[in-house]
Image: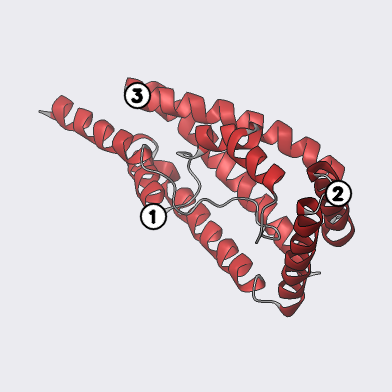
Amino acid sequence: MNKWKNSMVIATIAMGLALPSFAQAAEPGLPDTEMTPASRMAHDHGEHGQMHKKMRHGMHGSVHQKMYMLLLAEKYTPDSVAQWQEVFKERERLMSEFAALREDPKWKAKREERRQLVSKLNEQVKKGEITNEQMEQQLAQWKEKNMAMPGAKEDRDARKARMEKMRMTHEAFHAAIESGDAAKIKEVLPQMLEQMKAKNALLAKKLEQRKK
């Protein structure tokens, strides 16, 4: 009976992990209110799009994900439940502050400035005055001028390494869940927890930079 019950718990959790993530805590920045043709194609079909497809079921903070991770922690690493609860609470706080920051007049002005620039450049592309590549270049220059933060290059390099580590951890996590191997689940859960803590720390840093 216990074996059947345990199997049902694993199956339920696995199905939950297959649900799309409706509230992913991506690294917040200035939203692209209007995407250019080239950037839209890159988003849909490029490396970022492929990574999104692979990572969209990851543990990023939705209600369902929070519930399933807490279920796993309660069953396999009960001593860590309080830490999981705290990390989700902190994630919710950070995302609420990012949402509030979007209403800041300074950031609203930047979004409007970018929207107007995109509209202007799109018209120039339609008239054949500039190419899509030139449009992307001008937008990149605008972003560098208006959105660049200290250590941006280092952040990009660190982000690449972080994403690779995250990918490997998530693959190990999903493999453990699918196998139902208790030892593997116990081994990977602390790694997932540390990953969530690191993500929170990164979001907190970005939030402080945005407030300046």
Q: Nearer the viewer, mark 2 or mark 1?
A: 2
- In the image, what residue type sits under mark 2? Ile
- In the image, what residue type sits under mark 3? Glu
Q: Are marks 2 and 1 in contact (CB under 8 Å)?
A: no
Lower sequence index among marks 3 and 1: 1
Q: Is residue 37 above or below residue 95?
A: above
Quarter of the view holding residue 205 = bottom right
Mark linked to residue 152: none
Q: Residue at x 71, y 74 (%)?
A: 108
- The residue lying furthest to the bottom in this view is 105
Q: Position of residue 61 (x, y in %)?
A: 48, 51
Mark linked to residue 63: 1
Q: Nearer the viewer, mark 3 or mark 2?
A: 2
- In the image, what residue type sits under mark 1? Val
The local secondary structure at tag 2 comes to loop
Circle 3 crowding by C-alpha within 10 Å: few under 14, some 14–19, many from 20: some
Side (left or right) of 142 relative to 49: right
Gap in Å between the C-alphas at discs 3 and 2? 51 Å
Lower sequence index among marks 3 and 2: 2
Where does label 3 land, which residue? 178
Q: Position of residue 186 (x, y in %)?
A: 42, 29
Quarter of the view holding residue 85 = bottom left
Res. 181 visible in picture: no
Front one among 4 and 101:
101
Gap in Å between the C-alphas at discs 3 and 1? 21 Å
Q: Is residue 104 above or below residue 19?
A: below
Q: Position of residue 151 (x, y in %)?
A: 87, 48
Where does label 2 land, which residue? 130
Q: Residue at x 25, y 37 (%)?
A: 12
Q: Is residue 186 above or below residue 28?
A: above
